[in-house]
Image: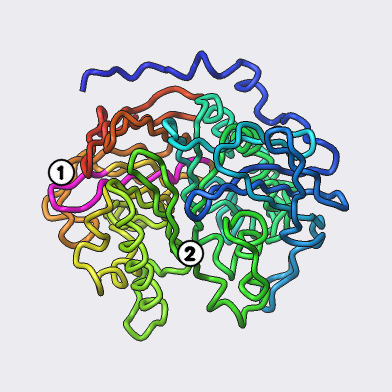
Amino acid sequence: MTSTLMPRLAVLVPAAILAGCASYAPQPPGIESAFVVIGENGQASARVITTGSACPPLQVDGKLLPMRVRVPMSSIPARAGQPHTPPSTAVLTCEAPIPAGTYTARAGELALPVPKAQPQRIVVIGDTGCRLKGKEFQDCNDPAAFPFARVAASAAAFKPDLVIHVGDYHYREDPCPQDRPGCAGSPYGYGYDAWAADFFTPAQKLLAAAPWVLARGNHENCSRGGQGWWRYLDPRPFEAGRDCDDPANDGAGDYSDPYAVPLGGDAQLIVFDTANTNWKGLPKSDPRRARYADTWRKVEQLARGAAYNIAVDHHPLFAFGANRDPKSGAATLFGGDRGLLDAFGDVDPGYLPRSISMLLSGHVHLWEQLSFSSPHPTQFVAGFSGTAEDIVPLPASVPPGQQPAPGAVVEAMSSWIDGFGFMTMERTGPDAWQVGVWDRDGERKNSCSVKGRRSQCEVAQVK
C-alpha cells in the first residue's frame, strides 16, 4: 500500500477536547443520557435515561411522538448471591422507534443522531470500562489511566455514520481499596451509578455523534452487569423474566438471538451474543454448547440475506492473545474462544459460515488484525478503548504451526499492544474497506485495506 500514516484527525479534534475531556456538555434537566440504538433489521430506537418523572417527548422531523417507558423509575435490584453494592440512583428508561428515512430527531431539546441507509464511516470500539475487581484496580480518576472519555471524543471528531461497540461496557464491580487514591470515591457494583461512570458519562460525545450497534460482552452476562444491559442497551424490547434480576431465569437472560443490520449496497452486519461462553471450553454435556450451535445456525440463515457479511461479537474466534509465565518469563500465545470453537465446530469445521467475510470482536485488550490463506474471515479485535490493557506483546509474525483456531492458516497479522484508541472503517467498494487505527488523541497509528475476506496492514507491530 502507498498511503502514509498521517494524523488525519488532528484538524478535527479541537484543543478544548484534548485539554478537557473530563468535562461534558450539560444534558437537559433530568436527562442522564440520550442515544440511538440500531437493532434487528436496522430498526433504530431512541433511548433516554432520566431521573425525571416522565419520558420526554420525541420530535421526529418536527412531529411530536410519545416515548414509551422501557423500564419504570427504579434502581437495579440486588441479585441473590451477589456481594453487597451500595444504593444506586433510580432512573427511568424510555424508548421510541425512529422511522427509516428520518432527517432530524430530538428527545426534549436534545438532538439525537439519525441512522443513514448506507453508512460510509464507521467507528469500532470495545472493552471501555474502568477495571475494579479482585486484585486488579485501574485508576479511574486519572484520565491518562482511564482514557475512554478522550477516546470517545476523538472518535466523535471522526464524524462517523455509525458506531459499533464490541462489548464489555461495565467493569466497576468491587469497591476501590482504601489505599488507592487513583480510584477513590468511584461508584461500584451493578447499579446505574457504576454504569454511568463507566459508560454513559465518558461516552457522551460519541453517543451524540452517531447511532450505535451494541454487542454484548461477558461483563454483561447475568452474573455481572446483565441487569443494566437489558435495561439500558439491548436493542430488543425489554422482557421481565429475562432481565437477569432472578438467577433462576438466567437460562433465558444469558442468551439472545443473532440479528442483522443492513449497511446498504448488499452488505450487512450480523450481531451475535456470546456473553455466557467459557474460554476453557464447553463439554458436550454443557447446555451452552447446544445453545451456541443454534446461534451458528441462525447466523448462517441471516447471512443468506446479503452478498457481504460482517459478523460482530465479543469473543474472537480467529485471533491471538499472549500470556507470560510468571516463573520463566516466557510468552505463550492462546487462540480464539474455546467454548465457541467447541460449539460452532459441532456444525461447521470452519467455525463460521463461508458467507461471513469479516469478524469484529473485542475481549482481548489490544488491537489486532489477522487474515488467512484458508477460507476464514478476516478478524479484527478492537478491545483497546478504555479498560486496562494487555501488555504481553504479540509477535510480528506467527510462529510456524501456530493457529488461532484449528485450520485457520494465518497469511497476515498486525497488532498494537498497550495503546488506547479506536478503529475506523471507511467503505471503498461493495466488499472493500479502508481501516484506520487511531490513538486516544486521534493520531493515526496504522492503516489497513480489506477486500472480501482478506486484509493487509501497513505496520506489523505498532510501537
Q: For the C terminus, which image quadrant?
A: top left
x then y, percent, for residue 241: 65, 76
Q: Quadrant of residue 326?
A: bottom left
Q: Residues within 10 Å of mark 2 (few under 14, many from 20)?
A: many
Residue occupying the point 54% across, 60% down: 219
x then y, percent, for residue 26: 78, 32
The magenta stretch spans residue 150: no
The magenta stretch spans residue 374: yes
Q: Which label number is shown at residue 247?
A: none
Q: Which residues are magenta?
A: 370-385
Residue occupying the point 55% across, 76% down: 252
Circle 2 residue: 275
Seen in the image, is 76 located left or right of residue 407?
A: right
The alpha-carbon separation of the residues under discs 1 and 2 comes to 29 Å
Q: For the N terminus, which image quadrant?
A: top left
x then y, percent, for residue 122: 44, 35
Q: Amino acid at mark 2?
A: Ala
Circle 1 residue: 411
Residue occupying the point 57% across, 51% down: 169
For residue 162, above or below residue 87: above
Q: Nearer the viewer, residue 142 or 295?
A: 295
Seen in the image, is 442 located left or right of residue 270?
A: right
x then y, percent, for residue 363: 43, 53
Q: Amino acid at mark 1?
A: Glu
Instruction: Let me know if residue 387 appears in the view.
Output: no
Q: Quadrant of residue 31?
A: top right
Seen in the image, is 310 located left or right of residue 213?
A: left
